[in-house]
Structures are given as C-alpha cells and as structure tokens.
Amino acid sequence: MNQQDPKTLVKMANQIALNIPDRVNTSQAVGAHLVKYWAPSLIATLQDYVVSHPNEVSEEVRAALTTV
Amino acid sequence: MSIFPLDRIDTSRDFGTPAVDSSEMLTVTIDGQSVEIPAGTSVMRAAAIVGSSVPKLCATDSLDAFGSCRLCVVEIDGRRGTPASCTTPCEPGMSVTTQSPRLDKLRKGVMELYISDHPLDCLTCPANGDCELQDMAGIVGLRDVRYKQIGKNHLDAPTDDSNPYFSFDESKCIACSRCVRACDEIQGTFALTISGRGFDSKVSASEGLKFIDSECVSCGACVQACPTSTLQEKTVIELGVPTREVKTTCAYCGVGCSFVAELRGNELVRMVPDKDGGANAGHSCVKGRFAWGYASHVDRITSPMIREAITDDWKEVSWDEAIGFAANRLKALQAESGIDSIGGITSSRCTNEEVFVVQKMVRAAFGNNNVDTCARVCHSPTGYGLKQTFGESAGTQDFKSVEQSDVILLIGANPTDAHPVFASRMKQVLRKGAQLIVVDPRRIDLVKTAHIRAAHHLQLLPGTNVAIVNAMGHVVVTEGLVDKGFVLDRCDMVSFNAWQDFIALPENSPEALESSTGVSAEELRAAARLYASAPNGSIYYGLGVTEHSQGSTMVMAMANLAMATGNIGREGVGVNPLRGQNNVQGSCDMGSFPHEFSGYRHVSDDSAREIFNQLWGTSISAVPGLRIPNMFDSAIAKTFRGIYIQGEDIAQSDPNISHVVAALTAMDTVIVQDLFLNETAKYAHVFLPGTSFLEKDGTFTNAERRINRVRPVMPSQTGMSEWEVTCALSQAMGYDMHYDNGSQIMDEIAATTPTFAGVSFAKLDREGSLQWPCNDSAPNGTPIMHVKKFVRGEGQFITTPYVPTDEKTTRKFPLLLTTGRILSQYNVGAQTRRTDNVIWHEEDVLDIHEADALERGISEGTWVEVSSRVGATRLRARVTDKVPAGVVYTTFHYPVSGANVITTDNSDWATNCPEYKVTAVQVQPSTMVVIA
C-alpha cells in the first residue's frame, strides 16, 4: 500500500544513513532505527520503491531494507 | 525554656527578610521564646518565625533587607538604641524584645510621618483591606496625625496609567524602594530607580519615562512588592479586592510557574505568583501574571459544532450529536480504508490527564498507534538524544540547580523572552559572578544586559550547532580537560574511547570548522576551556538546538560534552532543555509518541504492552504508528483520512503550511478540539470546544520534570472537561472509557507508568509538587537525575559527525532565516493575541542586518517580500545589528505573517522535528501594496 510519496521516504532514509552514529555497522543501525521508529507501512512502501529505483537510496539503506 | 519547632512554620507568611542557607545554627531568644535559626538570619525573620511579627514596610522576604522605613525597630539586651530588626543579624545568645512602650512610641511616630503625606481615602482605595500601610497603621495603634496635610506634600502627584495591566499612583508612594529592589533583585531588569533626593525622591521608570515607554517588562514583581496601592493591578481597581483563591499552574511556557488565582465569586481578579512555587519561587512574567484574559475572550467557542464539508457553515449542536457525528465518520473511514486510516495529535497545552486519555483513545478505541504530539515539532530530539546517552528522555536538573553553576553554557535559547522567570533566576546567578557562554546566531539580550556581559558569544551560522559542540569536545579531549575520574567511574568506556578517537580528529578542531561555523577558533577554544574547567558547568538549551536537521545529534553532542567534563549528577551542572510549552515534558511522558507508551517504553516492549492490554482489555499493536509528517503525506495519498487534533494549530505552527493545508483538505474528517476557531479549524468538520487552564483539573509537568497541580479556578465554560469529551468519543467509537474525575486518570497513569508510580492528586496536594521519577525508590521525587549512576547504567558516549544541512544559501536565496519568539507573545499567538499584550507586539517583523538592508534598498519599516524554496510572505523590516549580516530573523505569532509558509520540509534525521531554524531566503522590498 503506497501510503505516501516514496521520494519523501527516500530522503528520510538517506538522511538517517548519513547521520546514524554507528559508522561501522551502519546498515544494521539504519535497519534497527527504521524498525523502531517507522510505521511498517512506510518501510514497506520504501522497500517496494527501491526495487525499481535502487540507485536513489544509499548503499546502507539498500542493505538495511533487506534486513527489516 | 523550649526551642520553637521550625517544622511548624507556615512558609506562605512574609518573614520580612529572605531565608539564609547555612548549616551553622545558633539560638536566640525573642520575647522570651528561644529559637534555633541558621547563622545570618535577621532578627526580623527570627521574630516572625516565633510569631512575634515586627511591624515593617520596606521589608519583605523576597528582597534583601534595606533598613529604610524604621518601623521594625527592636530592643536587644546589652545593646544601645533601637536597631532595625531587618538589617540586624542574629547572634548567639541574643535576647530581643519586639514590644515595649518605647518601641510603640517610636513606631507610632514613624507611621504618623508616613500618613501625613498619604491620601486618607482608605474606604475608596482599591487596596482597602489589602494594604500593608493600612495594616501597619492599625498594628502600631495610630489614631491621629499631628502633621496636617496642608504643607508641602505629594497628594496631587500624577498617576501613570500607561501600562495596560497596572497603574502607578505616585500620590500613594511611600518611597520604600520595594518596587525598585524587586525590579533589580528578582527580575533583574533594573528598569526602576528612585530619582531625586529627600522630599523629591520618587520612583521613576527608566528615569522619568512612563512605564509603557520604559525598559519595564511588566513582570509584575514591582506590583507584587508594593505595600500600598501605588502599583496596583487594574483588575483590582475595576473589580475590587479578591475574596477567594485557588492555587494553580500557569499554562504558558515550560517553566510552569505556580500561581494563586484570586477571585471574586467566579470572576478572576488577578493571578499572583506563588511564593512556594517550586519552579518560580514567587516570581512571574507578563504572560502568566497578566495575560490570562484570553480565557474569557469573545472569540471563545463554547458549543460543539459540525459540518458535512469544510465549505459549509458551522452548525451548533449538542455534545451528543457532535460526538456521534464524529464517531460515525471515523468508524466509516476505518470500515472503508482500514484501521490505520485515522489517528490523533495530543497537545502540550493540555494536562497530563487530558493527553493520557487521547493517546489511550487512539491506541484502544482507534486500534492503532497513530498518535503523535506537537512536541514532534519542538523537543522530540531531546527525548531521543537524552534517552540514548543518559537513559531518560528528560532534563537532568531542577531550576534551582542553576544557583550552583559557575559557568552556564546557553545554546539556542533566549530565556529572557521565552522562559523569563527562569531567566531572572539565571540573571541573579550571573550577577553574583557565574560566567555565561552564549551560542546563538543572534545577539540575544543576555549577551549584554544590565549588570551582565557574557564571557563569550559564539555567534555561529544557523545550522552549525554540531560543529560548534564537536569543536568544544575536541578542545576538551586534546587539551587534557577530560574529567577522567568521572568518565571511568560513570561511563561506558568502549563508547568513550570511540568518541574520544572521533572527536580528536583534526576535522573536528575549532580551526578546521571555523569557516563552516563563522566562529573564531580562538574564541571557541577559550569558551571550551571555560566550561570544561568550571567547578560546575551547566548546559541550558532551547529550540535553537532541536529544530535542526541534526537536532538529535546535537542533543547527544551536548550530553557527550557534559559527561566528558564530569558535569552530570549534582547541583549546578547538567543538560537542561528549556521546554517551549507548558506541558511539553508531560505530553511526551504520557505516551504521545507513536512508538512509545507513557514512561518512554517502546510499543514492542512485551511487558509494557501487557500492562496496558491487561488494564484496558485491548490488544495493542506492537509496531509504531505514523508521525505527524507521515500523517500529512499519507493524507495527501488518501490513505490517512481522519484525525483528532487536541489543542494544536497545525495550520499555523507546522512547517511548509501549504503542504499542511493540502493534507488537511484531503482528509475526510478533521476534528479540532480548541478554545478558538483557529487556522486548522478552517479545515475541520467537527469542532469540540476546549477548556482553558482556568477550568481544568489535572497536572502539568514542566521542564524540570516537576508535576504541578492545575486546579479548576472557575466552572468549565463548555460544561464538559476535555477528558470527558475524549472519553465520550471513545465510547461512541465502541471502546468503554470512563473516569469520575482527573484524579482517577492520574491513578491509572501511576498504575501503568513506573516513573509516576508514587504520584497522586492527594500527594501533590500535600507536597505542592513532585519531580518524577517518583516511586518506591524515590518517594519524594527526583530533583536531580543520574546522581550516582545513569538511568541507563553507564553513560553512553555517541559519536556525532557534523553533517551540514541540505538547506544551503545560493545566489537566489542568499540569506538564512531563523525564527523565534518574543516576551509578550507565545507560540502561534492564539492566547496572547487575545490579550492586551498586543500593545507590545502588534505584528511580526523581519530583523535584517544593516548591510543586507542597505544592499537591498530596505530601511526601517519597509514592507519586504521574504521568499524561500517553498513559499513567500511579506513582513515589515526592522534594521538591527542583533542579527549578523547574512542572517534574518522573525517570529511566528500572527497567522498573517506566514513565517511557516516559507519554512521547509527538512527535518531532524532521527525524529522528523522540523528544521525551523534554517531556511535559505531572499529578501527584497515588496512591490505589492499591503493594506495594514
């Protein structure tokens, strides 16, 4: 279910990846952050979008989305 | 001879001189009664303690002794003469006589002189029955005055009525200087003085100006201190002396001042700051003291209203019809679009109890976690950052703690405007020698004001907070200023070592960051050394920290700095958010966020969820709901269709208003609960009238975690409490929710929330206030947190890389706009615009530096267009050097100003708190004719 413009979610996720303090296990930290603070529908929307637009999110976000 | 028991003292009385904080005790005898008192206590106070109150006029226990009225003379065994008891300190073994024929004669003579130059109009005086001069004349037994009022006198002196809230009748002034000293010692504005000498001595505002034209900030301290009717509230003049009183809590900023509401019947006459108030200790500001008239403003809506479409006219209906209408529409939306298609927003202006039931309604009756709070747009990064580092989403200190600070690091806060009562307390400390470091793009008043000059003003470019605090951390680490003992004892060493390695990197040095921040490396190093080497260094901060794309990072960076320097866990230190609204702390505590229950427990926490499921008979979702910006986006996508908005004007207060309006317009059912038909109500289908703080029965929690009672001063104008309305809607939605009173709601909060386990209305009524955590481990509450260990165990250092905001200046948008508030107005102005406070601020203006103004052909008062990437608005320009070149500033107190028409969708990476404080704009003279 597309709850909102996925481009907003792309921006938010990329921003999280850029700012999350854990720079070693960044993708795991991003995934944990998404699960903890995002409604599942938003994560699902982003996952769907990234399938067809993989280059719009950072590598860390792409990796994170495979783990959540 | 027995010693007088100090625990029998009624602290609400006036003891004439302030209490002395000394561990050394001594014993004196007053009129034959022995009393043990702290060394340094005045004879007047000791006498008052044992009940031998000495007549006085120039003395009051909120001010230092002055010794001018000569009414408080006493006799002391072994001493010659009759010293003034207010200025005479007790000495061990001293024996004092407060009543004797000799003293009676002296006091009567003094009173006779005062009354000889005072109007004898007691029966028609507004202070009749509430006048210390009148009281003292009676106490000393004055029956006639030998000096007739035919000589030179002040009886025809003029009255200054220029202030909207109080008058200054010079003819009644006895020149006791209490008002002058209150302005100096308590408020710290130094607006008043005694001009002239001898007979010509008189109280003067800014040396001869009318009050309204002077530096007076209308805090009311002078009115409170005046022992006559010289400085008198106009409401008392108009309505008469109050006949009953109710203690309650102010509903403006996060200081949470306690007040005594004084009434005649159900008509409020005045609000007097409560001397026993834990947050304010008897002080007030212009808003809390005087700006309460909005509660009875003609714009108040007191009947429920509904309409099918936002283009229809409102129709007044019964409560039952409004509730039924709202519930049917919400249920229909869920039937069509799923259980997650609706949600709610709680308000930081409402009580803990009102907020708690709204989030309960969303989780239990709506059946989802789509609840958020207006704290999303102000202090959500505080909750996130302090939880990560310290383990609790709240400030660490009580307000009184600042009195023990040696260095205060004030970041992104302007307390003299936004938290004025705390600012006065802070100014008292600074005048006694504490040093101040201000980190702010603007030259706020505290940088240089009466008797105060900040040691350092780090005038950074908006958006570079993290760079500044990282650079300070770099200085601490690389110059050997780390408090190793504290870090070793109290903090997680793995995290500290990682942070230390990170912060020592050359890229975090003041020199490397100088070009980004605009702050000289030399000055930053000096400021860092000052904070780190202080015996007690404290951090206070405001929305200038949180409302950034790195708001959460910045909160964690400050926490790192405090831990590295050992400035946590005792008086005088800490990391302290200055909360914007009265109950920001409380609304967050009550489980208003979509991922957390009350007490900041995540919804995925099975044990926490089970507590609620058991008690509420529910099956609450274990995953987070939507945040406010998610709700807006989903509304535009037509998947989020209904919302309940409690006391929050999102169409004025949230960023990128055109986006907010698009979301509201897209929704099928918008329910607004508020005092007024605010901007958001234009898009509402149901209007549920709310209650003002004067009608509420509950609690607010202020920025120091202090839970204060809010008591009903007058009956609800709507006939319903707000929580009753919420319960009714919940019932109509099919979920049974019922309470008999607010006390029962607090009992449920206590039963489900470990940090509130020991809180009840009865205990609050007994203790006055309680600072959470309040439970079996801390039955009397917790003024200072993390004393022996952090809530999370060991303090967690977190690396905080500086990531510049996406919002950058360009040739098209070359200036950075930042926003804030001013003293006389509050938030979006819904309350203060409906009071006489508008006299000080009739419109929002744009502050612009002279160089930027000159370059654009802008002069003082020019109408200018301010445009950003998302919108444009028009404001009048004020040319000032309070902002540096390249930065402009405005407030958002009037809807017409449209400050948030131009702020962007950028937000904090962790919490989505909007980046209100950084918007790239262009400013140019407006070509459009503006009709004022």
Image (tube, grey):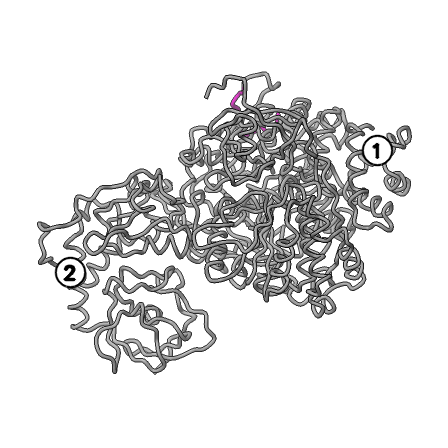
Question: As displayed, is residue B324 above or below residue B113?
Answer: above
Foreground residue, B644 or B187? B187
Q: Which residues are magenta?
A: B314-325
Rate crowding at label 1 as few (under 14), some (14 to 19) or many (20 or more) other CA atoms within 10 Å. Answer: many
Tell me whether marks 1 and 2 sit on the same chain: no
Q: Is residue B748 left or right of residue B799?
A: left
Label 2 amino acid? Leu
The chain that hosts pointer 1 is A
List x then y, in percent, for residue B569. 63, 64
Residue at 17 percent of width and 68 percent of height: B106
Q: Name the image quarter holding residue A54.
A: top right
Specify whether residue B752 is in view: no
- Compute the Cα span from label 1 to label 2: 84 Å
The chain that hosts pointer 2 is B
**Residue indicated by mark 1:** A46
- Magenta stretch holds residue B919: no
Q: Name the image quarter holding residue B73.
A: bottom left
Which type of secondary structure does the marked residue at label 2 adopt? loop
Residue at 44 percent of width and 47 percent of height: B285
Which type of secondary structure does the marked residue at label 1 adopt? helix
CB contact under 8 Å: marks 1 and 2: no
The mark total stands at 2
List x then y, in percent, for residue A53. 88, 29
- Magenta stretch holds residue B323: yes
Q: Which mark is residue B394?
A: none
Q: Quadrant of the C terminus of chain B?
A: top left
Question: As displayed, is residue B72 above or below residue B511?
Answer: below
Q: Quadrant of the N terminus of chain B?
A: bottom left
Question: As displayed, is residue B356 above or below residue B332?
Answer: below
**Residue indicated by mark 2:** B142
Q: Is residue B894 left or right of residue A24?
A: left
